[in-house]
Amino acid sequence: MENPTKQRRNNLEKYFEVKGPFALLRVAQMKRAWKQSNRRELTWWEKTYIPTVVSGIALTSKHFFRNLGLHILHLFGLYKDIPAAVTYQYPEQPRPLAKRLRTRHRLMKREDGSPRCVACMMCETVCPARCIEITAAEHPDPNIEKYPAEFILDLGKCVYCGFCVEVCPEDAIRMDTGKLDIAAYSRESMIYDKTRLMDG
Amino acid sequence: MPKLTIDGKEIEVPAGTTVIQAAEKLGINIPWYCYHPALPVAGNCRICMVEIEKQPKLQIACYTPVANGMVVKTNSPKTLEARKSVLEFLLVNHPVDCPVCDQAGECKLQDYYMEHGQYNSRLVDVKIKKHKKAFSIGPTVMLDQERCILCTRCVRFSDKITKTNEFGVFNRGDHSELDLVPGKQLDNKYSGNVVDICPVGALTDKDFRFKCRVWYLGQTKSVCPGCSMGCNIEIHWDKSRPRTQKVERAMRLKPRLNPEVNQYWICDEGRYNYHFIDDHRVLYAQRKDELMALDKAIDLIAQTIQPLKDSGKSDRIGVIASAQLTNEDLFIIRKFFKDTLKVSQIDYRVPQPTGDSDDFLIKADKNPNTAGAQTIIQPNGTDSQSIIQKAKQGELDVLYVFGHDLVKLFGKETVEQISTKVKLFVWQGSNINETGSYAHVVLPAAVYAEKDGTFTNCQQRVQRIWPAFLPLGEAKADWEIVALLSEKLGNPFSYRGADAIFKDIAQSVGAFSEMTYEKIVDQGMVLKK
């Protein structure tokens, strides 16, 4: 494998058409130059500097004192109908999620614990990000007939559109685990297989 | 000749033509299940019913012969209503398990239901279940009785085409089911064809089962390389599926209609003979056990041939071409070895054991291009056995072999001797075999599915093959490798592709005169005497 710096430089060369050892620097320059040349002209009022600083501080202070006052009043049970700004102590205190929010997928199980999926490949077909890969196999029970020998879902590619859930004829895949803090140190560990998806 | 009107369009067809055939000529689609152009008419699916003026009832288009002045309506309200009702009946006991059915996507039941369906089921009773769901009925085919619509195409196929009579419809009414005749197995040499003719998913192919959904398949027209019959086929390949694991590219082979050669059928041997396209391939040039770049390997060969060429010792070179190669490959081999190097010891024939054959499609000669090789190479006197003998006795400096597994044909000892006696033993092929391990240089060749070109079958019919894939690894079409070698030796060819070579063949080989790729297209052209 190539080292990451080299890879990054290659990418830069591809997209910005800059080459050589100072490619990174050159790109930074280009970005700065673009910003400078596209900057809006300041008005006379903005150019006087002090009044705009004061108005900025005034806005921040207004919110601060309003929230402070409302929170104190809420403590005494007053003006509960007027909401004040709220801070969640994430991740210790997660935000409540809407019921219909699409979160990480899970594969549903039959009563015997095997996947409900019949490997019809509808989700694989409809997936716009092409993150699902199913390998079908013959099930010993002829009434089930087909089951997924492998069900791979690459969360690194998934765009959470929910088409897979909508298209599934067996209600075998759902996006209701409530898990959205999916992070990993490598791309490979973002690839979920059948067992990981079935564990919920 | 009777003249009739179908949907307002007039057509004149020979007497005895059926309405469905006349409509097909006009490009009017009448749906059908049980009708098949190559099988006797059964008329049991009833979906092809059409309205004919002055006839009180609807008639089935597949069995009604045309008559003068007939006025047929294929999309009148009465006809459409009939189609709807027929579909409702056909689906009464159908399990509608499309998600697990391999036919989904190319299923006539699905297609026509989308066009003419009832959509809201009126069925209140439970569906009648058949004895068994999916079960094996032979080495290649699975049967699902519940999906069967009893069109009896497979029954007629086994009665009339293979004459083996494996299938039958048993019981009556809604208990009737398709099954094997007691004590029989579907194990004839053409069993795979029943899967193709089954309009629904009742008969499925074990080899293809669950491997790929049909909407992922791309099609490329080709010719079966399995024997000298040259049956027309379509290669179905995996098209842009998301894949992290390496899988086969070729998914299945299907017969392609050519009334002059194979009609609608191919044999099982040809149908399942595609795994070599992806398995055990020679991917890179090789010297003994060491992989090397193709041009380096060609350099190596050129270094050995150059002095022989300069001193005019072309009798120290032996070439064994192959009837597995396309006409284009063989023409370049002839042009380089025979015309440029003046090699006289060149042959394509090897003593092969005779394969099985029958009087239908399977031929004993298992090479797809024997006729073409004979016409193009025209070996004069020397045959491959004498070349091998000479190589064994050390009378050759270079032995160039295309694809043949010499170990299988002449024995291990012979090849071992050749490899020690001959200065340079080149083996050029697509799939790894034992001969490759004895060769001094191995060159990676493309398989037929990766090549553009033509084959000439046993009827002297020149048929086109199209490339379905890019060659794997550094493999190249045989003619390209020979052309590279020729360029190294100072005789560059100016061909840009197989079509340019074929133009040259048409000019310089009498039997091919007046042929072009445009003229050959699908059906092929017969060689001139």
Image (spheres, grey):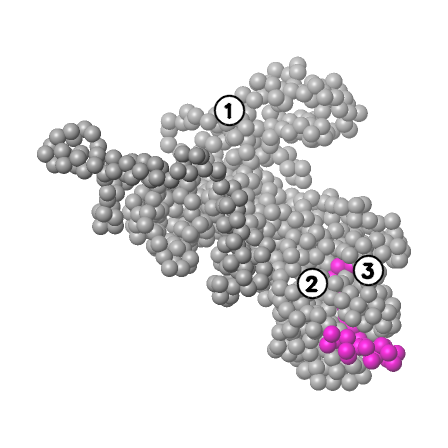
Residue occupied by mark 3: B494
In space, the residues marked 3 and 2 are separated at their CA atoms by 17 Å
Magenta-highlighted residues: B299-328
Image coordinates of residue B213 in percent, x first then y, are 52, 46
Answer with the quarter of the image where residue B127 lies. Answer: top left
What amino acid type is highlighted by mark number 2?
Answer: Lys
Image check: A62 left or right of B377?
Answer: left
Amino acid type at circle 3 is Ser
The crowd level at tag 3 (other Cα within 10 Å; few <14, some 14-19, many 20+) is few
**Which residue occupies 82% across, 63% down?**
B493
The label number, if any, that marks residue B476 in the structure image: 2
Taking A4 as reference, is B368 left or right?
Answer: right
Work out whether A126 lies above or below B209: above
Q: In which quarter of the image is residue B125?
A: top left
Q: Which of marks 3 and 1 is nearer the N terminus?
A: 1
In contact (CB < 8 Å): disc 1 and disc 2: no
Parent chain of label 2: B
Provide the chain ID for the residue under circle 1.
Answer: B
* Residue B419 in view, yes or no: yes
Q: Label 1: few (<14), some or many (≥20) within 10 Å?
A: some
